[in-house]
């Protein structure tokens, strides 16, 4: 019985940490996907934000998509239902277009979110 309680606490603590991931914590990890494009960071960020807002997954109407400029380009993020980061995309401008880094936070699967990031590169 005591082993089950300890196991439950470890699993619960791990899920809590994942669910409450912050952008700074997520960026310390290697990106899940890295893509390049001839488009600017702003074009890609607007495209991703539009598609994520209309994805219909994870209560899209309940969790807004956040987009903001950075010193290198733009970032787009979407929270999960617990307020942690579900997905984070950093798009940096380059001399030939941009580089997009997708980080997966506290969410299971990629679904339409990854497809949106990929489709916005063209």
Image: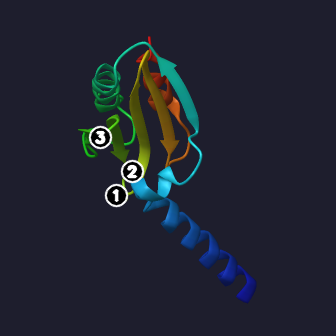
Would you say 26 lies left or right of 48 here? right
Residue 66 is drawn in which quadrant?
Answer: top left
Q: How is the image coloured?
A: rainbow
Q: Nearer the viewer, residue 104 or 40?
A: 40
Would you say 111 lies left or right of 46 here? right
How far is the residue under mark 2 from the one under mark 1?
A: 6 Å
Residue 6 is drawn in which quadrant?
Answer: bottom right
Q: Position of residue 105 (x, y in %)?
A: 49, 50
Disc 3 or 1, which lies upstream in sequence?
A: 3
Residue farthest bottom in this picture: 2
Residue at mark 1: 83
Residue at mark 3: 70
Residue at mark 2: 80
Q: Position of residue 28 (x, y in %)?
A: 53, 54
Disc 3 or 2, which lies upstream in sequence?
A: 3
Q: Position of residue 102 (x, y in %)?
A: 49, 36
Residue occupying the point 44% across, 15% down: 96
Q: Are marks 2 and 1 in contact (CB under 8 Å)?
A: yes
Q: Nearer the viewer, residue 13 or 94?
A: 94
How far is the residue under mark 3 from the one under mark 2?
A: 22 Å
């Amino acid at each position: 019985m005591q082993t089950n309680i300890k196991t439950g606490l470890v699993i619960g603590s791990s899920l809590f940490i994942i669910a409450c991931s912050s952008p700074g914590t997520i960026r310390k990890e290697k990106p899940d996907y890295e893509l390049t494009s001839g488009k600017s960071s702003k074009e890609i960020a607007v495209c991703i934000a539009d598609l994520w807002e209309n994805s219909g997954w994870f209560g899209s109407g309940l969790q807004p998509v956040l987009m903001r400029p950075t010193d290198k380009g733009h970032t787009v993020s979407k929270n999960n239902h617990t307020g942690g980061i579900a997905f984070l995309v950093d798009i940096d401008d380059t001399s030939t277009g941009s580089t997009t880094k997708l980080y997966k936070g506290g969410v299971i699967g990629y679904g339409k979110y990854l497809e949106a990031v990929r489709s916005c590169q063209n």
